[in-house]
Image: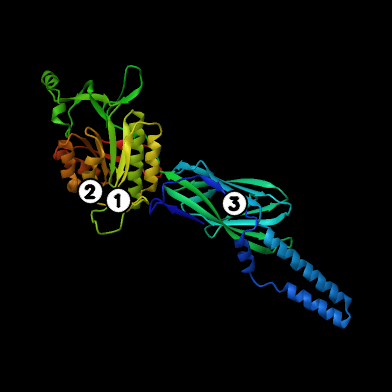
């Protein structure tokens, strides 16, 4: 059995990649499974044949009855001992991947006894978002009716490992819980079944793309760099550039403007030590009472957030994430504190994998709580696809409180929403993918 969480409702925070099954030696559950199977009439038929043959003096009937009894005895022994000392291991390599990348499901079966297993079958539900790749013909596995079915023939003390490539079509947390095991005897008949607990978790993070910003230029070393960064350090003056609507008035270089005759603003190098929190607005509709959402737009927002986190990490900024959405915990708000430690963007991706498309609290509540969750001077990057009218007052309050605020407006109305934010004095830019979230190659930030 397997389940997918994260986009709807995630589970706990433990994400073990795999676990070995127990080795049942005298497991009462096996007796329950065997005794609860369909009624076997062979012992009764064998006894009747022996008695009937003895009364009638027909030796052939007696011999046939004995054969039936022997077969029934062998079947009973197989049913009670076939699944004992069978170790199964299931794990993912790796257990964290990006959406669209393949994950390797490793199944290892070890028959740790002298009794051979003519056939052993393991079945489990395969989420529709995970697609088995490769040709299963001759591989010992197949996908039937949404189930992944594996089969083996094991000799005494034989161990077999198998790798199945699974392609992840959507982000999320995929939990595999139990395997439905069925074992057969020498005649090919199923004699015992067992549901064995074997937890394994696969985390599928959103895609991360290069963030393309306007006015790219090459420095003296020939490396490509952006003249404008989302995270700028005002102490690192890097020149001037033409003024564009929405630029803060305090960044206008008045002496250069007077000398050149056109308005120009100061340009700064990216910050190397500033805290940044990506405040993701997961809602895609204006109606707070409806449960509807734009699935593709939600995925695009997660791609933008994950890509920004990777960009901030590359620029040396301490990045974090805040989102008001269900993630499987009891907390209404999901918050990852800013950190400049290694692999912080991966932690952001793990949290985004758990985020569901359904908000757990109003976005305004999230922005209001950020004041107590982050330190003054932190840059808050608002990523939203909705009209900013509802949260602009809180954004301006953050600016007055000493926090930096940048509104990145996504979605088809992003440019209009960015203009509305700039009209109120909040730094804003529109952001979009250069294609569908499944196939896009860059995240474009407008000037």
Quadrant in the rendering for residue 148 = bottom right
Give the CA distance from mark 3 to mark 2: 47 Å
Query: Dot 3 corresponds to which residue?
Result: 22
Q: Position of residue 272 (x, y in %)?
A: 30, 26
Residue 226 image offset from top left, x and y in percent: 30, 27
For mark 1, does the 10 Å Cα neighbourhood hold few (<14), some (14 to 19), or many (20 or more) residues?
Answer: some
Which comes before the other along the chain, label 3 or label 2? 3
**Residue 288 horizontal/vertical position (percent):** 24, 56
Residue 206 seen by the camera:
no
What separation in Å lies between label 1 and label 2 (alpha carbons)? 10 Å
Give the foreground label among 3 and 1.
Answer: 3
Label number found at residue 303: none
Please say whether residue 205 is visible from this viewpoint.
yes
Q: Residues within 10 Å of mark 2 (few under 14, many from 20)?
A: few
Instruction: Give yes or no for contact between labels 3 and 1 (Cβ–Cβ under 8 Å).
Output: no
Who is closer to the viewer here, 25 or 113? 25
Mark 1 or mark 2: whose residue is earlier in sequence: 1
Callout 1: SS: loop
- Asked whether the residues under the numbered discs 1 and 2 touch, taking CB atoms below 8 Å apart as contact, a structural biologist would say yes
Q: Residue at x 46, y 55 (%)?
A: 3
**Residue 332 has which mark?**
1
* Residue at screen point 34% across, 33% down: 339
Disc 2 on helix, strand or loop? helix
Quadrant of the image for the C terminus?
A: top left
Picture quadrant of residue 119: bottom right
Mark 3 vs 1, N-terminal side:
3
How far apart marks 3 and 1 lie (CA) works out to 37 Å
Q: Do labels 3 and 2 touch, CB within 8 Å?
A: no
Q: In the picture shown, does residue 66 fall above or below 281? A: below
* Residue annotated with mark 2: 365
Q: Work out whether 4 lies above or below 373.
A: below
């Amino acid at each position: 059995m397997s389940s997918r969480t994260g986009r709807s409702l995630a589970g706990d925070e433990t994400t073990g990649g795999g676990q070995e099954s127990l080795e049942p030696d005298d497991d009462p559950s096996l007796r329950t499974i065997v005794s609860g199977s369909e009624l076997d009439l062979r012992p009764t038929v064998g006894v009747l044949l022996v008695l009937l043959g003895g009364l009638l003096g027909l030796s052939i009937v007696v011999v046939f009855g004995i054969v039936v009894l022997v077969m029934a005895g062998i079947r009973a022994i197989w049913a009670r001992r076939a699944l004992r000392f069978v170790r199964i291991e299931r794990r993912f390599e790796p257990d964290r991947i990006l959406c669209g990348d393949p994950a390797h499901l490793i199944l290892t079966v070890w028959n740790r006894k002298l009794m051979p297993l003519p056939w052993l079958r393991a079945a489990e539900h395969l989420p529709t978002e995970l697609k088995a790749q490769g040709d299963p013909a001759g591989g010992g596995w197949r996908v039937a009716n949404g189930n992944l079915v594996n089969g083996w023939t094991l000799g005494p003390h034989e161990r077999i490992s198998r790798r199945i490539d699974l392609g992840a079509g959507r982000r999320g947390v995929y939990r595999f819980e139990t395997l439905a095991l069925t074992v057969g005897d020498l005649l090919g008949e199923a004699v015992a079944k067992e549901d064995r607990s074997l937890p394994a978790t696969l985390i599928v993070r959103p895609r991360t793309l290069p963030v393309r910003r306007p006015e790219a230029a090459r420095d003296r070393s020939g490396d490509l760099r952006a003249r404008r960064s989302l995270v700028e350090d005002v102490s690192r003056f890097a020149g001037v550039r033409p003024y564009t609507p929405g630029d803060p008035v305090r960044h206008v270089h008045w002496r250069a403007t007077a000398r050149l005759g056109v308005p120009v603003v100061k340009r700064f190098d990216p910050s190397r030590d500033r805290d940044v929190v990506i405040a993701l607005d997961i809602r895609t509709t204006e109606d707070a009472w409806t449960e509807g959402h734009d699935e593709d737009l939600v995925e695009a927002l997660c791609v933008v957030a994950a890509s920004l986190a990777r960009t901030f990490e590359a620029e040396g900024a301490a990045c974090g994430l805040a989102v008001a959405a269900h993630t499987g915990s009891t907390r209404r708000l999901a918050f990852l504190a800013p950190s400049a430690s290694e692999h912080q963007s991966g932690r952001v991706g793990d949290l985004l994998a758990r985020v569901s498309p359904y908000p757990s609290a109003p976005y305004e509540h999230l922005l209001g709580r950020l004041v107590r969750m982050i330190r003054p001077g932190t840059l808050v990057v608002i990523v939203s696809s909705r009209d900013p009218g509802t949260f602009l007052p809180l954004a301006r309050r953050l600016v007055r409180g000493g926090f930096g605020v940048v509104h990145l407006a996504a979605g088809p109305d992003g440019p209009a929403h960015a203009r509305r934010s700039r009209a109120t004095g909040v730094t804003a830019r529109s952001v979009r993918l250069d294609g569908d979230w499944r196939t896009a190659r860059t995240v474009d930030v407008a000037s």
